[in-house]
Amino acid sequence: MAKADLISDSRSGKTAVKNFQPKTGIGRFDATYSATQKKLVVTSKLHFQFLTMKEYDRDTGVPTWNTRPDGPAWRHEEKQNYRDAFKTIVERSWSGQYKFVCRKPGWSDLEATVELQVIPDIQRGSSHYWIQVAKAPENEGFRAMVAHDPEWNGRFCNKDVEPEQAKRRDDAYGRFAMQWLNKAIIDTGCDFLPFTTGTKTLTPAALKSLGDFAVKASRYLTQDAVDAGLQVWVYAKTASKEGLVTASGRSKVIADKLKALLAPYGSAIQTVSKYSAQPWIKKPLDENLNRRTTLTDADKSSRSFAGGMLFVKSFMDNSGAVQLEECPSIPRNYVVVAHEFGHVLGLPDEYFGVQCDRYKRAMAQRSDWTAPTKLSTGTDRTIAQQEGFAKLIERSNLSAPIMMGTDTVNDSIMYAGNRILPAHYLTFWQALAKCTKPHLDFDDWAIAADNPRNAIHTLDGF
Ligand SMILES: [Zn+2]
């Protein structure tokens, strides 16, 4: 197949799919690849219905507010504003996050960025999904949902586009970020930072560890997180025969180096001045020393080890020493319509745990998070979604999103945040491959995980 044939097909609009349904068994959209514009335009055609409380109960058959008097009707400009907000939020969230690159030798100029277009004023019969929007009472919860074949229906409320959602702070997400940072400390060797004996000079290996950690940590050290109190603690010691070198001097060397590496978030770095001033440190320190194979039992009990280490406070299993109120509450910037639209694009929820062995195997490839040992129970449908998603992950070699229960919360858009991961482009990837058949094979396209915010989620990021 010659490249010119693909370009010619693209010019005449043949590199397109209509009503594409991804391998996950959910979602539906159109997609058109333009070789000259280097773009995959994804189109979602929606039909909106705006309903009062009573109308919503009647039309959905779900008695949400049936014992209550009806609320106000939607005004014309309210409907217009809602459709506009829905379109803006969804298009901004899902467009342009990652690029598709063509790996076929000689075809590498055929890259593609994703442009999502929501068309919100389509007749119901021609739409991909019809969206019912209730005008819900103030200060009441409402559970949005999207149903697929054969309903092709989304249910939302007036508040699901509101920015108040974005301001909510979350302890559970704070715990996730801290657990993840803790794993990053161990994986990069920052749980043991050696000095040249008798000096305050870090060894080249220790400097490399700090540099590696800074790259990974930058993913969670956002201004929001630092403002919320996310901290990395430094603790250093000297051994008995190290003369005039002081532990505090060594701590300062590590802290200064790390502050420079993590600028402008250096204020997140704290130093343990005295062991007794930080009672929470006992547990992670004991764990750290017990992991070391080079220390004798006497060294461990006297804590006369040489070198430094980094810590984060452990709130999950160290509650006697750390007050939960001290846990940083980090905003997740979750917006309901942005998440729900992920389902329209064919992506499964990530908060029901791992439900099939194939997904468990995909998640086990990650080195920064451990797949659960037991599978969660699911419905046939949610299991099939994970199965299909895992197949796409396997084929693409991308990092599997962390699927877990609800005790901690991560910031993935398909969990409860607003971060779009490379794997969330897999249904676009499948659509793109279909658009460019038979000129290119499925595996000729790859997702370039080139969004620096999410670098950790590539396989080579960890
Ligand atoms: Zn969902």
Image: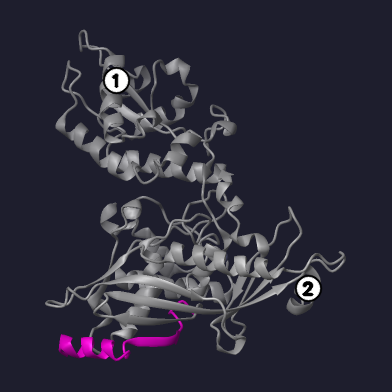
Seen in the picture, residue 422 relative to 33 is either above or below; the reply is above
Left or right: 408 in relation to 247: right
The image position of residue 120, as x and y in percent, is: 55, 76
Task: Identify which residue, 176 or 387, lies in the foreground.
Answer: 176
Residue depicted at x 57% and y 28%:
320
Occupied quadrant, residue 41: bottom left
> Circle 1 sits on which residue?
252
Seen in the picture, residue 458 relative to 237 is either above or below; the reply is below
Q: How many numbered marks appear?
A: 2
Left or right: 99 in relation to 405: left
Q: Amino acid at mark 1?
A: Lys
Occupied quadrant, residue 22: bottom left
For numbered disc 1, what is the local secondary structure?
Answer: helix
- Residue 391 visible in this rendered orientation of the protein: no
User: From this viewpoint, which residue is outermost toward the left?
Assistant: 106
Q: Which residues are magenta?
A: 1-25
> Circle 2 sits on which residue?
57
Question: Which one is in front in this view, the residue at disc 2 or the one at disc 1?
Answer: 2
The image position of residue 270, as x and y in percent, is: 39, 25
Task: Identify which residue, 186 or 62, lies in the foreground.
Answer: 62
Query: Mark 2 or 1 closer to N-term?
Result: 2
Question: Is the shortest distance between ligand 1 and the CB of mark 1 under 8 Å?
Answer: no
For numbered disc 2, what is the local secondary structure?
Answer: helix
Does the magenta-highlighted stretch encompass residue 3?
Answer: yes
Q: Residues within 10 Å of mark 1 (few under 14, many from 20)?
A: many
Distance of label 2 from label 1 (alpha carbons): 63 Å
User: From this viewpoint, which residue is outermost toward the top?
Assistant: 244
Q: Residues within 10 Å of mark 2 (few under 14, many from 20)?
A: some
Q: Amino acid at mark 2?
A: Asp
Q: How is the image coloured?
A: one colour
Question: Is the shortest distance between ligand 1 and the CB of mark 2 under 8 Å?
Answer: no
